[in-house]
Amino acid sequence: MIELGVLFGLLVAGAAALIFVLLRRGNSGTQNVEGLLIEQARREQAHNDRVTYNAGAVDRTVPTLRDHDRP
């Protein structure tokens, strides 16, 4: 019975530590220009991927003007 208490205590302590770390980080934005440029490039790449690999593109329909990577 003591072993279960120790196990659950360790699980609760681990969960509390993870919550503490996540709350400490917060939602702070990027503080420098390089980080903003990286975020912008990743956002544009994600948008291009969503357009290129959408359901219509997968079903081999006629490509639109937004599909830059398709012949």
Image (cartoon, helix red, strand yellow):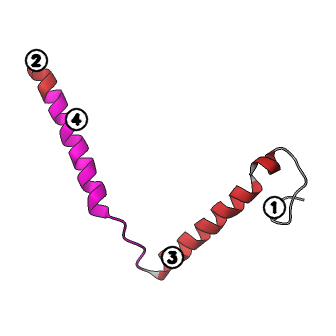
Give the number of the disc on residue 52.
none
User: Mark 4 or mark 1: which comes first in sequence?
Assistant: 4
Image coordinates of residue 44 in percent, x first then y, are 65, 68
Any mark on residue 69, and which?
Answer: 1
> For the N terminus, which image quadrant?
top left
Q: Earlier in the sequence, mark 2 or mark 4?
A: 2
**Residue 63, above or below 31:** above
Q: CA distance from mark 4 to mark 1?
A: 48 Å
Question: Front-most of 49 and 59?
Answer: 59
The magenta stretch spans residue 23: yes
Identify the residue at image location x=85%, y=66%: 65
Callout 3 crowding tier (Cα within 10 Å): few <14, some 14–19, many ≥20: few
Q: Of callouts 1 and 3, which one flags the residue occurring earlier in the amino acid sequence?
A: 3
Give the extent of the magenta segment: 6-31
Q: Which mark is residue 36?
A: 3
Q: Residue pushed farthest bottom?
A: 33
- The structure residue drawn at horizontal position 55% and vertical position 76%, both measured from the top left corner, is 37
For badge 1, the amino acid type reads Asp
Q: Secondary structure at mark 2?
A: loop
Residue at image mark 4 = 11
Label 4, secondary structure: give it.
helix
> Of marks 1 and 2, which one's residue comes earlier in the chain?
2
The quarter holding residue 3 reads top left
Q: Give the Cα distance between marks 3 and 2.
A: 53 Å
Secondary structure mostly taken by the magenta-highlighted segment of the chain? helix
Which residue is under mark 2?
1
The answer to which of marks 3 and 2 sits earlier in the sequence is 2
Amino acid residing under circle 2: Met
Under tag 3, what secondary structure? helix
Q: Position of residue 43 (x, y in %)?
A: 60, 66
Residues packed near mark 1 inside 10 Å, few (<14), some (14 to 19) or many (20 plus): few
